[in-house]
Structures are given as structure tokens and as C-alpha cells.
Image (tube, rainbow, N blue to C red):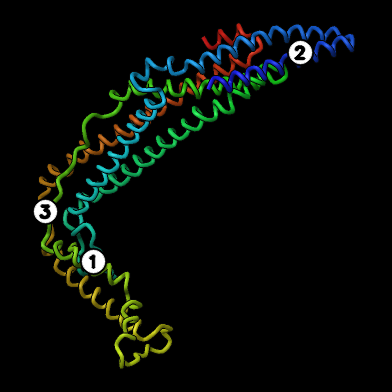
Amino acid sequence: MADPLLMTAAIGAGAGAAFLALCYMAGSLLQSQAIKTYARLEIDEYVLSAILVILVLGIVAGRDQILLPLSGTQTPDAAVANELGLIQGRLFNATRDLAVNNLRLGMLVGYNYNYQIPLVLPAAYTRGSSPSAGAGPLVSSLITGSDGLWLLALFVRAEYIFYLFLSRFASLEYLLPLGIVLRFVGPTRKIGGMLIGAGLAVYLVFPAAVLFGAALHPSLMPQGAMPMVQPPGSLPQNSVVCSQVIADLAAIGEIVGPTGICSLLPFFPGTPSIPAPIGIGMPGCAYWVSLIWWGIKFFFDVGMALSLPNNAMVISPDALIQSYYRPLVQGALPFALQTAMGAMALVLAHIIPLILIAKSLIEFFASEGQIYGLSKII
């Protein structure tokens, strides 16, 4: 990485020297003492720019060695990827565990976990209430927690992509080379210093902040696994409603449907044509098969709905509190909240130093008086 920057530094030094020569020649040609004085002052800044560029080249060349105390046995980039991946994995695992708890609670709160009654006024068949209905608000909390953890995991993933783009591509390919060239030329010195400061911040400070956050990780993130509630027992009707055979038959009916069934009629010679009712706008076979299929589903749903309330999985309030409420409210949800807050704190520990130190670096490299800039960064 240092060779392209050395070439860039040589180009910048040449451009700065050419600018100084033109200024001095213009002052001599126009007999302007002000232009000559400006050229002399620019020589000092040119020398300081050369010193700063040498410093930048040294930092870029020794970046991995500078970060080695923080990265341990890994290379800095691998350590950064490992840390951000660890945070993201914690969030994904917490999201999954909340979803499993939500599924198990939903099996208890409802009659079963994937059964619906496609009829008007289902209270007529469910007798107006579901077993353990008082646990329903917990479902909303679990869903909200899962959504929040998932969004945080996506944010951490976006931070990693942001790191890859800026630290390994933008800083070395654009920010630092362009900033070095512009820093040597008087009129663009501040812009060049700003680019150098931003490039060093994302190339050096950003990984350092992430690796520093890795040291805080064990104290901010919860240890162990999220408490999980036990799945409730199976109802007799679940063996029918949730039967794989029933599910396969329903899937085949939805996929094949009337079109597939009616397409078999030409293979049976002599089958009479079945007319559809007037105004339906579809072939008669498809109409009648659809009606028969809907009737089968209707009577199956009604039959199951009538029997479910009599076989509901009802447990006592004490058992509900002991087996579900306490593990979720005192265990799973606090664990999810601590995971979310720890992830947010770690992300802030990455971003806040990056912004603050980038501001100081920009002031240092873009300032005219380097003593002032050095005092600021110290």
C-alpha cells in the first residue's frame, strides 16, 4: 500500500514546488513584494507539509504494528471482522431465541400454533375465548423485542460494510492520495488536510475503536444463553390439524387446484362437458371442483373448531406464572434488552471516538499554524 502513496507524495511534492516557483516568478515579474513574501511563507508550509506527509506514510506503513497490541494474535482487519461478527451473532441468536419463546407461548395462548378459522364470527365456534388468554400481552412484547434486535443486527452489519468500504478502499484509494497532493499546494492546503485527517481516522482510528470496544464486550454483553420456556404438551386435535399428511394434502390442493384436476379430463374419453353457471366466466369443471374443494375445507375447519374448546390446553394461573411469565419477564426479555443495550453501547464506542478524533486530525492537518494544530490533537 505504501508504494502508490509514495508516488502520490512525489507528485504532490512536485506540484507544490511548481506552485512555489510560479509564485516567486510572478512576484519577480510583477515586482510585487507581497507575492514574494507569500512565496517565502509558502516555503515554510511546504516543508511542514513534507514532514506531515512523511508522518502519514509512516503511519500507513506501520498501521498493523500500531494496532497489534489491540488485535492480539490476529491481524487488525480479521480482529475487527471477528468483533463485529460476534456482536451481530449475539443479536441474531437473541432474535431467534425470542422467536422460539414466542412460538411456544403462542401454542399455549391459542388453541394451537398454526390453525385459523376462515369463518365470520369465530366466537360461535371458539366459545368466545382462548385458553390462557391473559398471557397474550407477552406475545406483543416478544414480537417487539425480536424486531428491535433484528434491526440492531442489520445496523451492525451495515457498520461492517461501512468499515470495509472506508478503511480498506476509500481511505487508501481516494482520501489519502488526493489529500497528500492537495496538502502540498497552498490554495488547496485546507482541503488536503481535511482529506488526510478523514483518511487516517477511518484507516487507523476506526479499527482501533472497534478493537477497544472488544475489550468492553464481556462486561457489556450478557453471558450465557437466553432463558427458554418449555413447549406445552400436544392437544389431541394438533395431531390432526398439524398432521404432515393433512398439510401435504392441503398443499397439493393449493398447488394443483382445479386447473390441474380438470386438465386430466381429456385423458378419459367420453367424459361429458360440464357447464358452469351463467355469468361465472370460467370453465364448468374448474368452477365445480373449486366449489367442492372449498366445501371440504369448510367442513374440516368447522369440525375442528367445534372440538377445540373442549380439548383446550388450560393451566392454572400459578402454573402459568411459574412456567411462562417469570421465565419470560424476569429472564428472556431482560436478557434481550441487555443484549440490545450492550450492542448499542459498543456501536457508540466505535463511532464516537471516530468522529471526535477525526475532527482533531482534520484540524491538525488542515491548520496553517502547525503548533496550534499539534496542541489541539494532544
Label 3 and label 1: CA atoms lie apart by 23 Å
119 up-or-down from 196: above or below = below
Q: Could you tell which of marks 3 and 1 lies nearer the N-terminus?
A: 3
Q: Which mark is residue 20?
A: 2
User: Pointer 3 and pointer 2: residues touching (CB < 8 Å)?
Assistant: no
Q: CA distance from mark 3 to mark 2?
A: 85 Å
Q: Position of residue 218 (x, y in %)?
A: 28, 24
Q: Is residue 346 above or below residue 47?
A: below
Point out residue 367 in the picture as x, y percentages from the top left corner: 63, 14
Is mark 3 in CB contact (under 8 Å) with mark 1?
A: no
Mark 3: secondary structure: loop
Disc nearer the start of the sequence (3/2): 2
Q: Residues within 10 Å of mark 3 (few under 14, many from 20)?
A: few
Residue 280 as seen in the image, left or right of residue 232:
right
Residue at 57 percent across and 9 percent down: it is 374
Cα–Cα span, label 1 and label 2: 82 Å
Point out the tag, 1 or 2, that comes first from the N-terminus.
Answer: 2
Residue bearing the label numbered 3: 233
Residue at 47% in and 15% down: 62
Compared across the picture, whether 343 is left or right of 305 comes to right
Residue 61 higher or lower than 305, as above or below: above
Residue at position x 75%, y 16% in the image: 18
The residue where tag 1 is placed is 248
User: Mark 2 falls on what kind of element?
Assistant: helix
- Amino acid at dot 1: Asp
Of tags 1 and 2, the one toward the viewer is 2
Q: Residue at x 31, y 93 (%)?
A: 270
Which marked residue is nearer to the observer: mark 3 or mark 2? 2
Identity, as a three-letter code, of the amino acid under mark 2: Leu
For label 1, count other residues whose C-alpha is less than 10 Å away and answer few (under 14), some (14-19) or many (20+).
few
Left or right of 135? Residue 263 is right
